[in-house]
Image (tube, grey):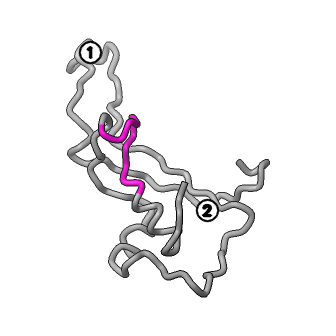
Amino acid sequence: MLEIGYLMRGEIIWHKGAGAGVSMAWGSWQSAANPVLRDTHEYILVFSKGSFSRKKPDDKEDTIAREQFMEWTKSVWIMNPESAKKVGHPAPFRLSCLIGLSSYTPSKVT
């Protein structure tokens, strides 16, 4: 990403909470034969293109409330995932959090 002009802002650990599921590695259940870690988190890598800051256009407004800003600027997000079938992705976090944190209204995010 750095080679193509993106700057690393940081990473978010998305703790999926109770929505992480209860799947087990049954082949090694309670055994040291082959313990398998169960992923209950995902990494969200956050990049900026070209610059860390953006000038706020005169005709746009921030899209994020104080409480959201305070929660979403933490490096650990604790939230249940959306339905993977519903959104069509195996790690379906709420994309609205990232959009709200990094966009103005009205904006078109593609």
Q: Nearer the viewer, residue 56 or 1?
A: 56
Residue receiving disc 1: 28
Q: Residue at x 47, y 56 (%)?
A: 12
Measuring 30% from the left and 34% from the top, which residue is drawn there?
85
Position of residue 104 relative to residue 30, above or below, is: below
Q: Quadrant of the C terminus?
A: bottom right
Give 65 or 74, whichever is nearer the viewer: 65
Is residue 44 left or right of 41 when viewed as pictured? right
In the drawing, what numbered circle is on residue 84? none
- Residue 6 position, x and y percent, is 71, 56
Number of on-image labels: 2
**Secondary structure, magenta segment, majority class:** loop
Residue 5, by quadrant, is bottom right
How packed mark 2 is, by other alpha carbons closer than 10 Å (few <14, some 14-19, many 20 or more), is few
Stretch in magenta: 86-95
Identify the residue at image location x=35%, y=36%.
39
Helix, strand or loop under label 2: strand
**Residue at mark 2:** 9
Q: Residue at x 42, y 54 (%)?
A: 95
**What is the x, y in percent for residue 13?**
43, 52
Query: Which one is nearer the viewer's eye here, 62 or 70?
Result: 62
Q: Amino acid at mark 2?
A: Arg
Q: Is residue 66 above or below residue 46?
A: below
* Residues at circles 2 and 1 in contact by the CB criterion of under 8 Å: no
* Label 2 vs label 1, nearer the camera: 2
**For this view, does 26 lie left or right of residue 73?**
left
Residue 42 lies in the magenta-colored region: no
Tell me which numbered mark, 2 or 1, is placed earlier along the sequence: 2
Name the spot of residue 90 as percent of width and height, x first.
Answer: 39, 34
Residue type, numbered disc 1: Ser
The residue nearer to you, when weighing 43 against 97, is 97
